[in-house]
Image (cartoon, rainbow, N blue to C red):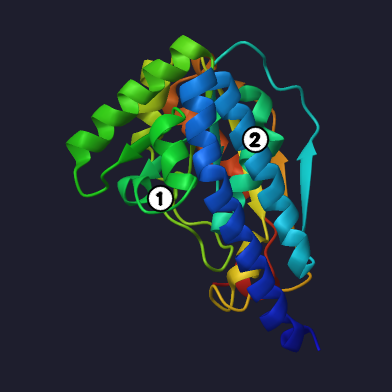
Amino acid sequence: MKNILAYPLSAVHYLVYGLLLVLFHPLQWLTLHLFGYKAHKKTVDYLNFMLIGSMYLFATRVKFINKHKIPKNVPIIIVSNHQSAYDIPPISWFLRKIHPKFVSKIELGKGIPSVSFNLKHGGSVLIDRKDAKQALSAIANFAKSLEKNNWSGVIFPEGTRSKTGVPKRFSENGLKILTKYAPSAYILPVTINNSWKLVQKGVFPLGVGEKFSMEAHKAIPVASMKFEDLFQKVEETIKNSVTLLPIQKNS
């Protein structure tokens, strides 16, 4: 029955999801050009809230876990594992008070209603993964922006999504540049669990009735230790909290 329901529920979800993106695209343009950054950010916040709500259409629930106080009025580098596109709205919504911006691939900067507009005009950075010089320069400027505005930047050091939930090797390059040019920042390790199950059969149909979680760990001051030690601690903190099935642990 669950497999049968997956098809119509997925279709309804995608219809609602797409309509939300199309509807909020002109709203973003209007709020940004008429009222500025704060109004635009509020619009994006509401969009992400509604995108999370659209997951209820295929009986999916998202749980946010945070047992620690997140520092205020400082730049924050959010470092997370990455399992699916459905990671983005919860990070954006549940951490909205610290103004999360994303390190994203340049391909996402055009052609996607709402998403592309926000990435280009909302403070995020678009990098060309085929051009290391452009990518590192763009990340450096992004870090300076975080430092100046006390925003947070989100980076997925795996570089791509894990389709099985098993974390990939973390790359240190992007994070190293962020910490260099945002020296007063804190790193906020975040662990995503089980969002990969939503798309384990591909983009259609979606997994029905799945539950996934996002856990924010204790923030670590960038200046508190050498980068090599900091990188290792962040990677271990994130990966040690990833929930794996026995078959995944052996893969």
- SS at mark 2? helix
Q: Nearer the viewer, residue 151 or 223?
A: 151
Looking at the rendered structure, the kind of residue marked 1 is Gly
Q: Position of residue 109 (x, y in %)?
A: 35, 45
Q: Residue at x 66, y 30 (%)?
A: 96
Q: Residue at x 67, y 67 (%)?
A: 13
Q: Which picture quadrant has residue 180?
A: top left
Mark closer to the chain start, 1 or 2: 2
Mark 1 Cα within 10 Å, few/some/many (few <14, many 20+)? some
**The C terminus appears in which quarter of the rendering?**
bottom right
Q: Nearer the viewer, residue 105 or 190?
A: 105
Q: Nearer the viewer, residue 67 or 245?
A: 67
Residue located beneath label 2 in the image? 45
- SS at mark 1? loop
* Residue 210 visible to the viewer: no
Residue located beneath label 1 in the image? 159
Q: Position of residue 250 (x, y in %)?
A: 58, 72
Give the number of callouts. Answer: 2
**How far apart, in angstroms, are the residues tagged by discs 1 and 2?**
25 Å
Q: Nearer the viewer, residue 161 or 33?
A: 33
Q: Position of residue 6 (x, y in %)?
A: 71, 80
